[in-house]
Every structure is written in C-alpha cells, then in structure tokens.
Image (cartoon, helix red, strand yellow):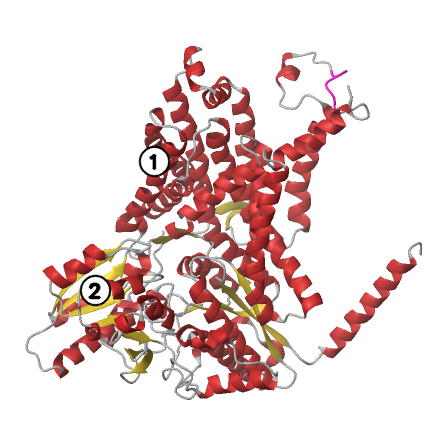
Amino acid sequence: MINRETGTFKRTYAEDLAIYRTPLPKIAVAVIAFVVFVIIPWQGSEYWLGILNLIGIASLGALGLNILVGRTGQISVGHAAFMSVGAYTAAVILREFPGTHWILAMLGGGCAAALAGMFFGIPSLRIKGLYLAVSTLAAQLIIEWIINHWPWLSGGAQGSIYIQAPTFPWIEDGALVSRKMEANLHYYYLIYVVLAIGILFALNLFRSHLGRAFIAVRDRDIAAEIIGINIFRTKLVAFGIASFYAGVTGVLYTYFYSIANFESFTLLISIQFLAMCIIGGLGSILGSIFGAIFITMLPIVLDFMLRGVGGAVFGWDDAAASAIMPQWNLIMFGGLIMFFLVVEPDGLAKMWRNFTDYFRVWPFPYV
Amino acid sequence: MKHPKLSFLALAGAALTTVVTAGAANAREFVLGMQCDRSGPTQVVGNYICDGAHDYIRLANKMGMFGEGNSVRNFEIDHGYNVPRGVEAYERSKEAGHVSYGLYGTPHTYALTPKLTSDKTPGTSPGFGSAGAANGKSYPYIFPVAATYWSQAGAAVQFVMDEWKASGQSGLPKVAYLYYDNPAGREPLEVLRDIQGRVGFEMREYAVPPPGVDMRPQVLDIVRRYKADWVINHTFGKAPAVSIKELSRLRFPMNRVIGFVWAAAEIDMQAAGWEAAEGYQALQFAGVGQNHKVIDEIKAMYAEEGKPPPEKMNVSVYYNRGVFIGALHARAIVNAIEAVGAENVTGDDVRRGFESISDFTLGGFMPPLNLTPEDHEGGGWVQVWQVRGGQWVPLTDWMQGYRDVIMEHVANAEPPKG
C-alpha cells in the first residue's frame, strides 16, 4: 500500500534503514523538496521570500532547541544567547580575517556556540527542570553582558558589527564570477539548504544510539544510567548539538540582516523559541517547523486579516487601523495559542499525526 | 460559464479595477512606510509618537500639501520591538512601493540600514539608531534628523557649564553621568569623555543595568559619596521615573539634574510624581505642549470631523515628536515632488528631498533644521525644558553645545565594518 507498512517489503538492508519506508512519504518529501527549491523561488515575490527566509531561520533555531528540550528534556531559556555567540563569532572571524569564506565563518559560529552551550550545560548534571531553566537564564544574561561590555567583540559602543554580504559562484557571460547575495531569493537558497541539512541530520540523529539515549535520559534518567548511558555526556552532547543549531541560526540572521547585533537576541527571543517548540510539538522535527511557521506567520496573517476586516466592516483608515489593530493582534495571538494548546496539548505536530493516523487505517478505523 | 455568481463577481471586480485605475491616472498616492512598537516593551512611547505622525500626514493630505489629487498614505506596521517582525514590516511596505521610511527602535535601525541603502530608500531614526549616522557620507540613506546622543551630550554639558557660571560659583562642577547600560546608553560616552578631557571638569560614570528599576546604589553613590554638583540622566523606559524618585528621596536638588530626550516625557514625571520632579530639566528635540500652530491645525481638523482632539495629544512630548517625524517626511516628499514632478518621485529623490530641507521650523515647533548631503542630523539642536508646577516650561532657546568636538566624531564615524 502507498501509505501503509502492510505489503511494503524490505528486501535489502538499505531499504530497512531508509528514513521513510512507505511510498507516500517518499513521494511527499520529493514533492515538498520540488516545491521548496523550484516552485517557490520561481514564483514567489521578494516579499514572500523574505517571510519564508524568516520562517526558515526560525525553523532551524526551533529544531535545535527541540533536540534539547523536546528530546532530551533539558529546559533552556538561553537559546537566543547561543545564537548571539554564533552571530558574533562569525562576524568577528569575517572582520579579523577578511577573505575567510563565509561557510567557514558559519561553521566557526556554530562551533563557538556549541562550546558555549556545553559550558553552560555543565550544571545540568546536578540540576533538572525549572532549576536548570534558571541556570540557563543566567547563561542568557551573562552572554548578553559580555557582548555588551567587550568592545573588541561587539564592535564598539553600538554593540554591532556590519558584515559583507556572502558571495556565491555565478556564471556570467560564460565566465565564473562570484556574486554578492542581495535579493531575498539568494538568501532563500542559503537558508533552505542549511535547513535541509539540519533536518536531515536531526532525522538521522533521532534514529541513532545517541538519539535513543536522549529519549532515555528525558524519560527516566536513573533508568538510563542503569542501562549504561553516560548521562553527563549525553546531556552535554545534547546541549552542544542544540547550541550548534542555535549558533548557525544566529549566523544566518547575521548574514540575512548583514549585521550582528545582540539586541536581536534577547531573552524575549529565547522565550519565543521555547513557545515555537511547545506549540509545534515537543521533540518533533515537523513540530519545530510548524511552530516556527505559527509564531512567525500568525502576527502577519492577523495583521492582514484585521486590516481587511477593519477596513471593510468598521471603515478604519490607516491611522485608526494602526492604532487599534496591534491590540487586537495581541489578544488574538494569545487566544489562538491557548486555543491550540487546549485542543491539542501535544502541539500542532500531534494534530498532523492524528490526521495521518486516521488515513493510515482508513476506511477501517476500528481495526 | 458554469458559475454565474463567480462570473458576476469577476466582472464586478474587473469593473472596479478599471474605475480605480482611471481615477488614479493623474493622481499619485505616495506610500510612506512606518514601523512602530504599539504592543512591545516601548509601547508607552510608540502609541503616542505614531499617532502624532498619522495626524500630521492626515493634516498634510487635507491641506493638499502634495499637490492636486496627490496624497500620502502612512502605511504603519506594528513590530512589537521584535527584529524579524521589523524586517517583515519593511519588506511589506517596500512591496507597497514606499518612497520614504520611518524606522522605530535601535536594533531595527541597525538591521535595516543595509537594506535601506541597497534599496535607495531614506529612513529616519530620530532619537535612536547610531549617532554616527549624522555623517551623510558614511550613512547615505539614514537620517537621524533630530539631535543624536552625541549632540545631546554636547548640549547637556554646555547647559551644565552655563548654569554653573550663572550661579556664580568658582571652579568647575562635578558631574555624574547616570546611564542605561546598553549600546544606546553607552553611545554618548566617547563624546562625553572627550569633552571632559578638553574642558577639564570632573566626571564619573554610573551604569544602571537594564531594565533600570533599581538604582539605589548608584544614586546613593552619586549623592552621598561623590557629592555630585550635577547629574546627567540618560535612561529609558521606567528608569527615568525611578532615577527622579531616588534622587529626590535623597534630597538632591532637581534643578541640577538634566535628562536626555528619552527621560523627558510627561508620563515619566507622572510615574515619579510631578512634585518630586519639580525643577527637573530635560532636553527636547521637538516642541512640547499644545501651544503650537500645527497642533491647533490638527485640533481644527478633528473639530471639522466632529471629533474631540485625541487624548494622546496630552502626552505632548511624544505626540509632538510624532508630528515632527510626519512633518519631516511630508516636507521631504514635497521637496522631491518639486524637484522631479509627482509621477517620477523615487526613494532616491526623497533622499535628496530630505537633504534639501533648509531652515524648516514649522512655526517654532522645531529647531531651524538644515539637512545637507553631509549632515543628516540638521545641526543637533535641542531645547531645555523644566518641570514647574506640574508642567513643562521652556528654559532655553534652541541650543547646541561643543559642536566642534561632535563634528570631529561625526566626521570619523563609519559603520562598524566586519
């Protein structure tokens, strides 16, 4: 069957190890990849590509946090701080060593963030839950403070470093030239290729020994230790991987804005990323993306809707709409988050799973 | 056709489009992109400023400032002080075809500076963003238009020195600089230290960590140990009110405190208590109060519509700054129309429109503003106002301070390159 395991025989080891074992998900992923990498860039306007860029970057950050919070059960409210570590590392590398390739700077940013994340993950051996949340809160404040007070690192009083736009190879008049990324389309490819790699890595990570160890640590750490999992190592690796994602996310923000600025990575942003994980579905890759889409798009969609409704029904002009709408936007934003969490506490990903599970047994839901 | 209803709708839509385009054939609606924080941490400022800008643009449209049939649409989007949403807001108004852009918030100004430059659209950042942007050569598309933190620092020291001289005391005053410990708070430091070195007065710096709701140790230090003669107060948000409360609790004379432009609003004094704030002085870059011709005109516009004047007008410090921002954008667009004709105006023309603003005062509402391709700040004028009997009273005329020192710093200002 196209969407059921029944009748899908695995004849080789490769087939048995495949991420998707039934035909339908394979087709779906191929179609999504085609839409994401061909149709959207071809048809999308600059504006929508800009929004998709923001969603893509947020998805990567949420995915990283979800590995830590959803899979390993370690609450972190310092995610944005690790992004700023990545952002400033890349910016400083590009400033101090001009000519360094931006991919190297991106990896450098990720690694620096991973180190910082592992350092601040050390307390996780002794403390759990809300206590750990408070200790990662300290990470957020300490990192913000250091960037704020170290002029060499932060580029002086403004606390920001402008960077040159990344370049990419391009064929012009039959010759290979290197072109600067300017349009949202260029960044779109950068961001979505990185996101695709991030998703692929996470998919495989979750199937590995380490990925299963994460779940064991989350569900019952003492039991995990008894069956031979080194808890400290597992937790630290989780912090490292999550922070690597965060660092790369910060670097992507830096490339996209052409500036590293720590005021883009405040505590509020950390909380927003936690919200993405919770609304999307803890521990789920799809959930991270759903959450990122939800949190990024909702204010925009509400803005569009309220502007339209306000104009058509109440006759708001721009002045009235601007004054009233943000308040409604806030109310509905909060209300919708509550609504979705009440309807499905396990997040949007669970809703999607319910939907697919229904069709998995359709038309015999009673079997 | 299978769906008669749908085809009818399509026809109606087509007809409507024709009517609209026919009507707009020789009139142009300019889009003025604006971002605002009406739901985030600075909403107590944004809600007033942005309403002021809206009211001025409506007034300008009503007065037919942009020529026959033309109008300006103030397309404002709330970003809740969130940078990605600010970037989205910019992209959306770019999609709508904006010719000029009103920024809101320092991180947003930084994040959008490269985009504004590559899109050749002028953006205003009055009272925030980078002081170096006064240098039009380094930041061609960013217009601080109002006194930057550097100019405010110069004017504040000038005012302190003048007052010290006027009080007949010998020597030089001991100055305490009380500041919010973020990039905006630290920005004036390099200029202040420079001026201090040249003038030779004593100065100590007191950082207040954000959100600045507790500054007892700093104020105690200033008043009891350092025994400062003057305090320069550069705080934001709830911190100005807290600083006034703490200083007055220790009986520090309020007429020896001078605040920068974000420690200067009615709401801050309300929060601290007008009595406690009696004598407090602050810098303003736009007129305060309602005794201005332009405010009367806005009131008249509301009266004509049969509505009472907006309540937000009463927080005149912020509301008037919004009017100031709206007026400058309107002026720049008018200049651009005069230069190239309404149908040809692009963002770059509006930039030149900003750069050709000269001696623009709006009837004393703002300082004599002169913008040039080199100077995007317009002179860095401020006015000192004082709290007397529960309201702001002007104390000085439009003033500048240590302009030579500040211009040296501006000349060397460049975006911090990576």
Residue holding disc 2: B249
Q: Is residue B293 visible?
A: yes
Instruction: Tell me where the magenta segment starts and ends, as one range.
Output: A3-8
Q: Residue at x 49, y 70 (%)?
A: B50
Near mark 2 (Cα within 10 A), the count class, few <14, some 14-19 or many ≥20, is: few
Residue holding disc 1: A135
CA separation in Å, label 1 and label 2: 35 Å
- In the rendered image, residue A5 lying in the magenta stretch gets the answer yes
In-image side of B34 versus A363 (left or right): left
Near mark 1 (Cα within 10 A), the count class, few <14, some 14-19 or many ≥20, is: many
Residue A291: x %, y % from top left: 57, 41
- In the rendered image, residue A57 lying in the magenta stretch gets the answer no
Chain that bears disc 2: B
Q: Residue at x 68, y 50 (%)?
A: A43
| Nearer-the-camera pick, B288 or A296 | B288
* Both marks 1 and 2 on one chain: no
Residue A191: x %, y % from top left: 53, 43
For residue A124, above or below residue A174? above
In-image side of B153 versus B355 (left or right): left
Where residue A195 is drawn, which disc sits there? none
Amino acid found under the numbered disc labelled 1: Ser
Please name which of the two marks, 1 or 2, marks the residue nearer to the observer.
2
Is there a contact, CB below 8 Å, between mark 1 and mark 2? Answer: no
Q: Image quarter for residue A324?
A: bottom right
Chain that bears disc 1: A
